[in-house]
Image (tube, grey):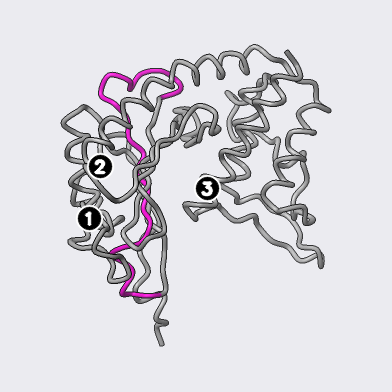
Amino acid sequence: MVSFASRYRVPTSIRQNRPLTNDELQRFVPSAFSEDKHDSRSERYTYIPTIVLLDRLRDEGFQPYYATQSRTRDIEKRDFTKHMLRLRRHDQLDGKEVPEIILLNSHDGSSSYKMIPGMFRQICTNGLVAWKNFGEISVPHKGDIVEQVIEGAYTVLKTFDAVTDNIDMMKGIQLSEPEQRLLSTVALDFKYDGKKPPVTPDQVLQSRRWEDKSPDLWTTFNRIQENVIKGGISGRTAKGQRTRTREVTGIDGDIKLNQALWKMAEEFAKLKA
């Protein structure tokens, strides 16, 4: 017998090395196309489908390359739940690190329109999220939302010079093996909230490709981020049973952990500097 959850399960996410089409977005983030707000929202709630905003952002040169939507057991909320798009601008597609604007929204009251600076690392397809000090834009569901979101996108765009400077600083800092192990230990504490992790700090430091073997802070941070976020590492539970670490798929968990890891690396850079 097919369970209720599996019958209505939405694919978790989609990423392409080209702009996503509306057909692809409709499949993976149907809530971005919702034709109305959830019944729980008041009359003061200004409703504009995310796809309308996205079309305006496309006119400004911003295109979606990644999309995901929160899962829900309530089928009636499927078309209103939180969704996330990672956008790149047409004139910022080159380089090992590509700036991305992370657009969050929902129509069930769980999120305002939010725009957060992020970075896509080509070599390992890591979707990084910059720490909050670079600036986040939050637009409530009221007033002239479209123009506020467009303005917010350009405001976030201006922060990328500071983000790039931060990355360059990390690239110039070399770490010893004990320092790398300290970072991976802290990262595991973040992910498992102080509980005993199923894997060791040394496992989290393992490179998945030869290009990531450099001991500089930026590369070390990316190795840790990829292993902690993407999971798939063999380990053992507290009871000694074999297991594999899980990928972080929830939108809130992804953003929170990603930002915490960036903050960790940033604070370590200050100590080393």
Amino acid under disc 2: Leu
Q: What is the C-alpha distance between the residues marked 3 and 2?
A: 21 Å
Instruction: From the viewer's side, name the closer residue of 191 and 230.
Output: 191
Q: Residue at x 40, y 36 (%)?
A: 137
Q: Residue at x 28, y 65 (%)?
A: 42
Number of the front mark, 2 or 1 = 1
Which quadrant of the structure image shows residue 216?
Answer: top right
Q: Residue furthest front?
A: 44
Question: Magenta part of the protein: which range?
Answer: 74-98
Q: What is the C-alpha distance between the residues marked 2 and 1?
A: 24 Å
Q: What is the C-alpha distance between the residues marked 1 and 3?
A: 26 Å
Q: Quadrant of the N terminus?
A: bottom left
* Magenta residue check for 93: yes
Mark 1, secondary structure of its residue? loop
Of the numbered discs 1 and 3, the one sitting upstream in the chain is: 1
The picture places residue 68, in percent across and down from the top left corner, at 37, 51
Mark 2 neighbour density, 10 Å: few (under 14) some (14–19) many (20 or more): some
Above or below residue 46? Residue 145 is above
Query: Which residue carries the number 3 mark?
Result: 254
Number of the front mark, 3 or 2 = 3
Amino acid under disc 3: Asp
* Magenta residue check for 113: no
Of the numbered discs 3 and 2, the one sitting upstream in the chain is: 2
Query: Which residue carries the number 1 mark?
Result: 47
Number of the front mark, 1 or 3 = 1
Amino acid under disc 1: Tyr
Above or below residue 172? Residue 42 is below
Which quadrant of the structure image shows residue 219?
Answer: top right
The picture places residue 69, in percent across and down from the top left corner, at 37, 56
| Numbered label attached to residue 20 | 2
